[in-house]
Every structure is written in structure tokens, then in C-alpha cells.
Image (tube, helix red, strand yellow):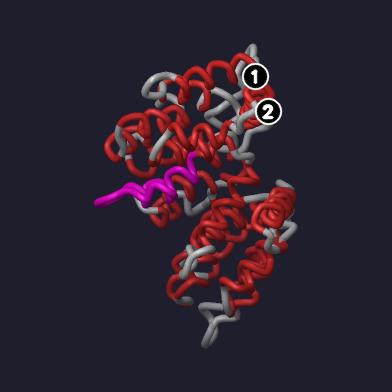
């Protein structure tokens, strides 16, 4: 099932946003390890790294069963006890995709996001999808921390990098996401939802040319709950759902960007489930996308992403990972995903 079909199947939206995040529920797949002892874990990792042939199984079992906060404490304990940097030791001990996952797991969330943005922008050609994915799914506080880390690690202002990598309407949209203070309120203003739906219709389908600025303003400033109701109201003034309307009205990076924002605001786990499916469908696997999504969402909503994946594609995410990956790399990804 494509994302559009998923959208149509839930077209009435039945106030789905209110059921999306139950109060107090944890939707990650990686939780803090009970009876955690960073010194013991550091010693275990040291032995695994120095073992003849390297004991990848032990390294994996420690990394995927500790929260990110706990991994930071393990890094500090490793440095204190050995005088060595755990990341450098693992980089020397591991190879290929397993090395990439291990190093990603050892970064803080902000460090990993900054790293992914750097990877998406440092070469000729920009991976625009990565920029939109990160900026559209992180909170204002998270984006500020990413920006701070980016400046510290790479000696460049993130805002300036975004301006350099994008042009025109796409640049406006990226900067709006970067600066956005989107409300997290669950409250919905019904009159505003109807007004916004009509404004979006008049700014796109019902005129010659598209008023992109209006789309950017509404889609980057309203809360997710508010936008969910706006999408519902849009169906009352148009024969198309909003993603289909954008697909007909726009082209290029700005089309992809605004459609992704709609997807994120309507159903973030389904957005990431589609990302994972795209990374593994057909011949070859986009390892960077697979690692980026699984690691970055492991303590956020990966459990819900796994559920959406099954709903959309009628098979378990873990099954597709087993089909597309091998060896210790497969094992570490399955460890991050948790059981079916």
C-alpha cells in the first residue's frame, strides 16, 4: 500500500491525531537497560574489541540494549579506564555497514542528525530528502541543538549551509522549517482549519499558478493536530486530497518538500515506514537511509513505524531487513528494531 492509498483509506482522519500518541506511552524499541553499569559495559567492550578476530556479537548485544544516554556514559567510562576513544577503537575493529551503525549508535541524537546533514550537503549534489526529513520531524529545541552541534563539529552555520544548498521556493521552505516554532498543542481551532483549507485551495487548485508562500506558511506553522483537521476540511472543498493536489500543482524539490511535510504532519510513523520501504525495495539497498531512520527513531517512535510498515505493506519490517541484509549488520539492525 502506497502512502497515498494509506491517506485515502484514512481519508476521514477520524481524529486520528488524538489517538496517535497516548499519554505516557513509550513507542521506542530501545529502552534504558536495567541495573546499568557503565564501567562493566566498558570492560566488556574492551575485551570484545581486543579479542582475536573481534567479538562482534558482544559489541552488538551491548550497543542495541542500552539507551543513547547510557551509551554516552559507556563512552566516558571507556575513556576513563583505557585512555582511548571508544568510537576510534570501534572504527578500527569493525568494517562496512556494521561500523556505520555502531558509530551512529554512539553519537547523541543531535550529533547524528548533524552528521547526516553534513553527509547530505558536503559533496557535489545535495540529498534534499534528508534535509526535509530531519527538519520536518524535529522539534524547535532539537533543531537548535542540531544547529549548535553542527557549528561546533563542522565550523559552519547550519542556516548558511541550507541557504547555499537550496534555491528559490525550496530554500524558503527549508528555512521556514529550520526557524519554525510549530505548536505541539492537541487543541484544534475548527474555524481556522476551514479557513486554512479554503486558503490552500484558492492558493493552488483554484487559480492559475500556485501561491507557494501561502502553502509554506500554513504547513510550517500550524500544529500537527491543527493540520490534520485542515487536511480533513480540504477534502470538503476539493475532489483531491492535499498530497494529490500538490503533486498536480508543483514540480521538483518544492513539490517533494511540501508533500513530505504533509505526510509528516498527517502520520509521522507512516512517513518513516515509507522511507524504510523505499530504502529496501527493488535491487540494492540504501544503507544510509536504513541506518538513519532506524537509529534516529529507535527511542522515539520506531515501534509505531514497525506497526505502520506492516499495515502498509502486509509484511514485517524485520522480514524485509532479513531479506536485504546479512551477517552482523543484519543482527544489529534487527536488534534496534526489536522483536516482531
Identified at 44% across, 70% down, the residue is 247
Q: Is residue 17 shown left or right of residue 157?
A: left
Residue on which the image places disc 1? 38
Q: Secondary structure at mark 1?
A: helix
Q: Position of residue 172 (x, y in %)?
A: 64, 73
Q: Position of residue 108 (x, y in %)?
A: 64, 39
Q: Is residue 306 shown left or right of residue 226?
A: left
* Region of the chain picked out in magenta, as a range: 275-294
| 214, 61: nearer the viewer | 61
Q: Earlier in the sequence, mark 2 or mark 1?
A: 1
Residue 188 in view (yes/no): no
Tell me if mark 1 has few (under 14), some (14-19) or many (20+) residues whose alpha carbon lies within 10 angstroms of its own.
Answer: some
Residue 287 among magenta residues: yes
* Farthest left residue in view: 283
Q: Position of residue 83 (x, y in %)?
A: 65, 27
Identified at 31% across, 30% down, the residue is 327
Q: Secondary structure at mark 2?
A: helix
| 309, 118: nearer the viewer | 118
Q: In this rendering, which labeled residue sits more in front, label 2 or label 1?
A: 2
| Mark number, residue 76 | 2
Residue 102 in view (yes/no): yes
Q: Could you tell me what secondary structure mostly forms the magenta stretch?
A: helix
* Farthest front residue in view: 83
Q: Position of residue 40 (x, y in %)?
A: 61, 14
Mark-to-mark CA distance, 2 and 1: 8 Å
- Tell me which corner region of the image, top left, top right, bottom left or bottom right, holds residue 307: top left
* Farthest bottom residue in view: 208
Q: On screen, 291 above or below 191?
A: above
Identified at 61% across, 52% down, the residue is 114
Q: Are marks 2 and 1 in contact (CB under 8 Å)?
A: yes
Amino acid at each position: 500500500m502506497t502512502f497515498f492509498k494509506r491517506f485515502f483509506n484514512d481519508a476521514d482522519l477520524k481524529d486520528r491525531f488524538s489517538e496517535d500518541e497516548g499519554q505516557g506511552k513509550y513507542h521506542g524499541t530501545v529502552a534504558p537497560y536495567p541495573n546499568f553499569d557503565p564501567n562493566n559495559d566498558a570492560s566488556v567492550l574492551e575485551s570484545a574489541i581486543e579479542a582475536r578476530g573481534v567479538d562482534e556479537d558482544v559489541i552488538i548485544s551491548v550497543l542495541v540494549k542500552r539507551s543513547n544516554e547510557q551509551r554516552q556514559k559507556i563512552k566516558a567510562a571507556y575513556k576513563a579506564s583505557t585512555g582511548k576513544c571508544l568510537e576510534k577503537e570501534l572504527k578500527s575493529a569493525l568494517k562496512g555497514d556494521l561500523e556505520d551503525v555502531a558509530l551512529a549508535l554512539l553519537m547523541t541524537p543531535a550529533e547524528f542528525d548533524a552528521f547526516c546533514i553534513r553527509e547530505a550537503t558536503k559533496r557535489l549534489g545535495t540529498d534534499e530528502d534528508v534535509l526535509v526529513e530531519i527538519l520536518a520531524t524535529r522539534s524547535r529545541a532539537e533543531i537548535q541543538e542540531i544547529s549548535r552541534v553542527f557549528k561546533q563539529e563542522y565550523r559552519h552555520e547550519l542556516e548558511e549551509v541550507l541557504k547555499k544548498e537550496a534555491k528559490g521556493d525550496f530554500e524558503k521552505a527549508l528555512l521556514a522549517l529550520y526557524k519554525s516554532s510549530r505548536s505541539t498543542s492537541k487543541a484544534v481551532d475548527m474555524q481556522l482549519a476551514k479557513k486554512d483549507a479554503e486558503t490552500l485551495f484558492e492558493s493552488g487548485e483554484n487559480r492559475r499558478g500556485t501561491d507557494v508562500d501561502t502553502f509554506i506558511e500554513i504547513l510550517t506553522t500550524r500544529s500537527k493536530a491543527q493540520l490534520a483537521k485542515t487536511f480533513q476540511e480540504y477534502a470538503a472543498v476539493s475532489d483531491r486530497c492535499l498530497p494529490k493536489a500538490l503533486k498536480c500543482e508543483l514540480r521538483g524539490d518544492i513539490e517533494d518538500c511540501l508533500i513530505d511535510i504533509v505526510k509528516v504532519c498527517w502520520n509521522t510513523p507512516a512517513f518513516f515506514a515509507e522511507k524504510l520501504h523505499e530504502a529496501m525495495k527493488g535491487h540494492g539497498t540504501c544503507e544510509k537511509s536504513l541506518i538513519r531512520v532506524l537509529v534516529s527513531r529507535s527511542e522515539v517512535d520506531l515501534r509505531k513505524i514497525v506497526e505502520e510498515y506492516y499495515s502498509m505493506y502486509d509484511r514485517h519490517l524485520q522480514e524485509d531487513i532479513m531479506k536485504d541484509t546479512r551477517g552482523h549488520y543484519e543482527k544489529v539492525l534487527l536488534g534496534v528494531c526489536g522483536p516482531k
